[in-house]
Amino acid sequence: MTDASPSSTATSSNLAPFRESKSRRDEQHQRANNLISAVTSKLNANSNSSSVNSPTIGNDIGISACSVRPLTRREVSTLEGPGCSCKCEDWSKVLVITTDGVGSGTDLSAELRGQICTTTFAGWVLLGVNIGNSTSSDDSCGSPLKPGVRRNDLVSNCILEPGCTVQGNTFIDRTHVCPDASIINCGSVTFASDSSFADEMEITIGAESGGGRDVRVHVESTLVDVCHKLGMGSQSTSSSHFHYNHYKPTKLIMNTICRNASILHSPMVTCVYLSPHSSIDAATSVSNVILLPESKIAKSCTVDAAYLQWKATITTNSSVSSTVLMECSEIGPNSFVSSTVLGPDSHLSAGECHHSLLGPNTNSHHQSLLISVLWPLGRGNVGYGANVGSNHTGRLPDQEVCAGEGTFWGLGSVVKMPVNLCDAPFTVVAAGVELSPQRVGLPFSLVLSGTEQDGGGGLNQILPGWVLQSSPYTIARSEAKFANRRKAKRHAWYTGWCIIRPSTIDMCWHAREELVKAGNSSLSSQPSGQNSLERARPTIYKSESIHRLGQNYITENGRRKGILAYTNVIQLYALRGLLLKVEKALKMCHKSFGDEVAPR
């Protein structure tokens, strides 16, 4: 991150949840590899023998004492019979997996009759069987709540573990369905044989062409990781503290649906990994997606190449591609998002966002447009109709917008690239303002459309420190709002900084100094023969006098109010710091000498 985030250095305890998540996914990947190895071993052994006549029992394969063996002739007859009505061109490639070491003398016909029906198998299939569950097929096939494999047009090259539910699907291929996981009423759930699907991908943010910033992100990325890779981190921060330095990407070999995860009512799903308690429900198309626990994709969404962290959501007619949603973030309804990193606790709905980095607690709840916006500290809002990153000049889209912390883009505002507000945190761009390319360095300001009476020459008017002087409630409310809305507990170590802190006070100090200097310079430039009463300051100031103004102007009254606002906040911050030090010293005295030496 930057100096604005005082706790951006990660510790081992901060990174533990991210590393544990990666470790669990790698363990699941290894489990799938072990099961495939067991299947391959059995098929190779069976190719030289009449395996259907002579069942073999799989030895322990290092995964919870599971055993793998081929079907017996009687079990094949059961599956083909009227109670199950299953089909397969080569039953020797359909193996059963059990979890309690069932021996060669155990017939599973009753269990198969109760759990498998009306399904066509192809290729190799590892078929899970719950031992002791021999419910009649007539009852089980009619109940969607009971585990089993029922009414699927085609299942091929799959691992269907005991206790999973695979029902009412058109085509399932190269998919590992774990116990208590579900695939119900879907079209095709497949995995491309030539897929490069992995838990790391490259996203281009910033300028859409001619200078975009390529950044490699992984499923457990933090904003600290991303910003450090983009060169936004503090130069004094050791990169050895960051998670990505130790990250080894894993190329996934098949779809994985972990325990208590589900894919429901979705016509097309390709190359996915669902962690426990995650879900895809009624999505239009989903491909190359990894969901961490309790995340979900729902309601007619189209998603390609996305990572959803814990409790992240994509919902309701949204289209998302090449995007990372960090913990507790949300996209939808009716959103179009591409090549974006969405920080924790952030929300995008009813608008578009492309090639952008949005920090924590960033919200765009209305129809709006964000293009090439770098907003690492987030905490801002985008009003209805705002066009942030407009680039309709006929040139290549090779510029970007650097937004400051807490920026509010007002109703219908138009922001033309390039714009830099990094040194103007918590600035309000008022409704209808057209912000031309510029850099502004006046914190807590209000930008208004200019008036002819002021003689601004068509420029916008800026009121320095307006939020501090005229709307201090905004700061108090924001502090409380950010604290209440911080649900992303795994990212809490770097998202809880205060608004009024050393870095923002430094910005206020530099802004005040330039405002004071501009006023003194305007007096000293006038003829020396005039006395102080005769000397008149100019009516307005532009960037020639105050570089931090950007392409705006301020009035003399606005300059004086800005100086007062910045002076007040600097003094109050200093006095609060002094009070805290005095209270700390008194506590130490009480502890060491008692009330007689340091009376309360």
Image (cartoon, rainbow, N blue to C red):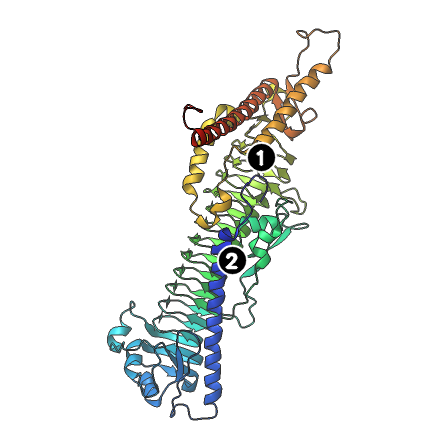
123 lies left or right of 413: left
Choose top left, top right, bottom left or bottom right for residue 592: top left
Label whose residue precedes the other's in the sequence (1 or 2) = 2
The residue at the point 47 percent across, 27 percent down is 472
> Where's residue 408, x and y in %?
51, 35
The residue at the point 59 percent across, 40 percent down is 3
Say if 83 sits above or below 53 in the image.
Answer: above
522 lies left or right of 575: right
Label disc, if present, on residue 219 of the rendered structure: 2
What is the distance, in whole Å, between disc 1 and disc 2 at their CAs?
A: 31 Å
Q: Amino acid at mark 1?
A: Ser
Q: Amino acid at mark 2?
A: Val
Q: Nearer the viewer, mark 1 or mark 2?
A: 1
The residue at the point 66 percent across, 7 percent down is 533
Q: Secondary structure at mark 2?
A: loop
Say if 553 sits above or below 22 in the image.
Answer: above
Q: Residues within 10 Å of mark 2 (few under 14, many from 20)?
A: many
Choose top left, top right, bottom left or bottom right for residue 374: top right
Q: Residues within 10 Å of mark 1 (few under 14, many from 20)?
A: some
Say if 177 sits above or below 206 in the image.
Answer: below
- Any part of residue 424 in sight: yes
The residue at the point 52 percent across, 68 percent down is 252
Viewer-closest of 430 and 50: 50
- Any part of residue 367 in sight: no
Position of the C terminus, as image quadrant, is top left
Label disc, if present, on residue 503 of the rendered structure: 1
